[in-house]
Image (spheres, grey):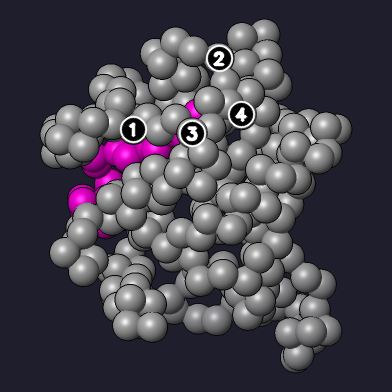
Amino acid sequence: MNILSIVTVRKGSKGLKNKCTRKIKDKSVFEYTIEYSLALNRELKGKVFTVVSSDSDEIKNYCIKNDILFIKRSPQLACDFTQIEEVIYDAYCKVGHYFDYISLLYGNVPTRYKQEFLRAYNFLINNKDYQAVLSVQNVEKYNPSWMFPLNEEILPIKRYEGYRRQDLKQFMIHDGHTILFRTKHFLEFMQKKGLTQKKGLYDTFGGKIKPMLNERVIIEIDTEKDIELAKAFISYKYKK
């Protein structure tokens, strides 16, 4: 096996309570991510090893029932201010084996696509000068040029930058689907520099990162609206 797939599922959530254990078509949100990770192992013929990092007893019981390695996350690694790199490093060390790559899978993303992971994996195989791949999407209508600081009393004044979206400067954003990176760079960063030396948003994963653009429907569950969107999309997908 050369890929450690770490599914991260935290019990607490201030934005949407118990978001990872909410049900969509009689299946918890986190189950979609775990099943996706296991499917990647079948697709890559045993190259992917799945581990689940969580502080939830419900998720622990699910993993025991399904013979999936579970890493019990300490309270210090389950706080609002915990950085995800600490969770990854903790899980990696506790597994106790070397892997060439690490895949980070958030447990609150139920819409998943094997093809996107395979694109990322094959890119790193064929491009040795890159350390990581990050899936991204075009911001589209949520372009920063059309955004205002939050003010419920009066619309703030903003400089006009264009009426048509295609005329605006384009932006991309990580969609929560794929973060795949080489283990070597990550371990060196964590062991030698540590997170106090972190300068860029994703520099723990690589000095040279490929942003892999896609147009998939990817729903990261953070609000009640996200739950409703996911229910509608997954119901539609299963009917096809």
Amino acid bearing label 3 = Gly
Disc 4 marks which residue? 101
Q: Nearer the viewer, residue 104 or 35?
A: 35
User: Residue 156: horizontal and vertical position, in percent?
Assistant: 60, 77
Disc 2 marks which residue? 98
Distance of mark 4 from mark 1, alpha carbons? 16 Å
Does residue 4 appear left or right of residue 125 in this picture? left
For the point 50% across and 29% down, the residue is 4
The magenta region covers 4-21
Label 2 secondary element: loop
How crowded pointer 4 is (Cα within 10 Å; few <14, some 14-19, many 20+) is rated as many
Q: Nearer the viewer, residue 18 or 160?
A: 18
For the point 63% across and 23% down, the residue is 100
Amino acid bearing label 1 = Val
Disc 1 marks which residue? 52
Q: Earlier in the sequence, mark 1 or mark 3?
A: 3
Label 1 secondary element: strand
Is 236 in the magenta? Answer: no
User: Residue 69: horizontal and vertical position, in percent?
Assistant: 30, 26
- Please report contact status of discs 4 and 3: CB closer than 8 Å, yes or no: no
Label 4 secondary element: strand
- Please report contact status of discs 1 and 2: CB closer than 8 Å, yes or no: no
Does residue 103 appear left or right of residue 164 in this picture? left
Distance of mark 4 from mark 2, alpha carbons? 9 Å
For the point 40% across and 56% down, the residue is 109
How crowded pointer 1 is (Cα within 10 Å; few <14, some 14-19, many 20+) is rated as many
Does residue 99 appear left or right of residue 161 in this picture? left
Disc 3 marks which residue? 46
